[in-house]
Image (cartoon, coloured by chain):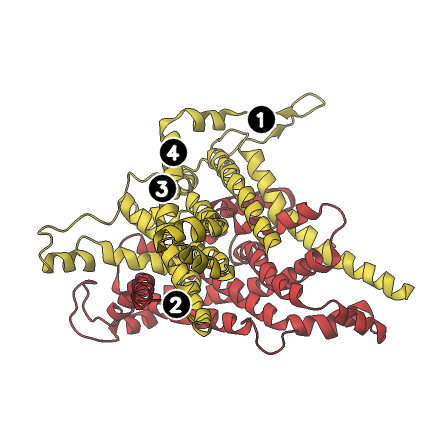
Chain colours: A red, B yellow
Amino acid sequence: MTGRRSIALLSVLGFGYAFLYLPIAILIVYSFNDSRLVTVWSHASLRWYAALLDNDQMLDAAWLSLRVAAVSATLSVALGTAAAFALQRLRPFFADRGYEALVMIPLIVPEVLIGLSLLLLFVVLGNAIGWPSERGALTITLAHASFGTAYATVVIRARLSQLDPSLDEAAAILGATPWRAFRRVTLPLLMPAIAAGWLLAFTLSLDDVVVASFVTGPGASTLPIVVFSSVRLGVSPQINSLGTLIVVFVSCLILAATLITRPGDRGKV
Amino acid sequence: MTLAAGEARGMRRVMLGATTAWLAVFTLAPFLIVLAISLVEARFGVPPYEPLFAWSKGLWPVFNGTLANYATLGSDPLYLEAFASSLRIAATSALITLIVAYPMAYAIARARAELRFGLLMLIILPFWTSFLIRVYAWMGLLNSNGLINALLIKLGVINEPLTLLNTEFAVHLGIVYSYLPFMVLPIYAVLERMDWTLLEAAEDLGARPFSAFRRVTLPLSLPGIVAGWLLVFIPALGEFIIPDLLGGPGTLMLGHVLWTEFFSNHDWPLASALAVSLLVMVLVPAAFLYRVLRRAEVAS
């Protein structure tokens, strides 16, 4: 490679990463700005972070979001593991393509459609069988699990496809029943993918505003719903500091998820 | 052995049964309900739509279905404009994303092997990091008293602040920014597998670098380009947050129109008809994408 060409490639990367990271970097810098005006720098302070701690509405919403995300992520990986297993090992004999399409469809369907369709499901179910009697944390959790499962399945299935099926056979020859082989051999080997899938489903739930807005009921506002309704009114310094906290928190989770599944790490078979 | 076989069958039944039941209730049924409600008329009341089947005096229920909502979508200029501009904005912003992403994917694929994982990681990380906050960050930059305008005025490029926020330009920018990883990854995947000696061979045979790129690299990376373009086009088509926060009153996109129909006009049946149309519009390119990815998988 000539020197000129590598300089060109380097500058492409420089501009590209600047485009990706500068807006967030500027948001973070300005979250420490004391001024009430978002675009005028006065001096550095933690004023808006302190204001966040006094904002009960934000704190309640954050707590609700964390709980919804944890439960829906757990549901997502449980279903995602079963679905990945069904797709990879059990090969449903009928409607193979149909099953796969149903698992994957939330990945490509617009959020507004997922939100509207799940809301209508809850309304119709509520009218027909009286459950769910009201919409709120429960319906948001179920809705998040429905798209979280799709992402968890993709991550877990990728790992499952790398595992050697002869490990199961070896366990069977050594006398393990299929359940036991699954629990003692397959599941531990899948653990990194299950952990990564959980973190992914968790962050997706924590970030979702559209689906939650549709399926929520009175009194149940997740953090993204509160942030979104405030952001619609314009830029505010408190949202800058909240955004900084969210970005730092979620980045850590995603870094953890990526490092867990990093190719070539220990535990790979 | 028969005991194990019986248990294997039982395990299969539990896993398939549990996931199939879940998918039937939380994926299939909602779509069927949307389809059903798109076929009835709105009314005042709870729920705000007519039942699809009404029990009147006769023995059989009366079928209430109508295509009136679809007729509205197909005749009202507002909705026609929304269909057209969604397709246009999604298509052009996917194209701009391609122009930005291709050189990046190329540069990463040609970087030293031990750097590639980190470079890719830096592409993926922002995508998973709070979509809402990243779109919001642009609101602060594009504002009439935002940083970009302040910088341009200070440099003497302009005297008056430009209107950047609440424009179609801002919507394009938001889509390119948000979905860039979707384009970089598939293009990188094909470039990384490429046999670079082909390029050297072309240059040895006298092709100039640009012509070698155009006649060797570009055709070989076509599956990645098509996959990336579709991966940006499909979510952009139904996007809601970006047009809502960055677009102006004149920016009509289907996801946003659906939201307004539902939350502001409380017209559930019309919102459902929009949802069904959106689903059809998304499934066609998605089926194509599935074939492209399958073929790429088989080829590798």
Q: The disc labelled 4 sits on which kind of residue?
A: Ala
Outermost residue on the right side: it is B2
Whether callout 2 and callout 1 share a subunit is answered no
* Earlier-in-chain disc, 1 versus 4: 1
Q: Chain of mark 1?
A: B
Mark in front: 3 vs 2? 3
Disc number for residue B45: none
Residue A34 % position (x, y): 20, 71
For label 2, the crowd category at 10 Å Cα-Cα, with few meaning under 14, some 14 to 19 and many 20 or more, is some
Q: Report which residue position mark 3 lands on.
A: B89
Check disc 4 and report the residue beneath it.
B84
Q: On the rendered structure, is A76 left or right of A186? A: left
At mark 4, the secondary structure is: helix
Q: Are marks 3 and 4 on the same chain?
A: yes
Among the 4 quarters of the image, the one containing residue A85: bottom right
Q: Residue at x 19, y 60 (%)?
A: B147
Q: Are marks 1 and 3 on the same chain?
A: yes
Label number found at residue A246? 2
10 Å crowding of disc 3: few (<14), some (14-19), many (20+): many
Disc 1, SS: loop
As displayed, is residue A241 above or below residue B248?
below
Callout 1 and callout 4 share a chain: yes
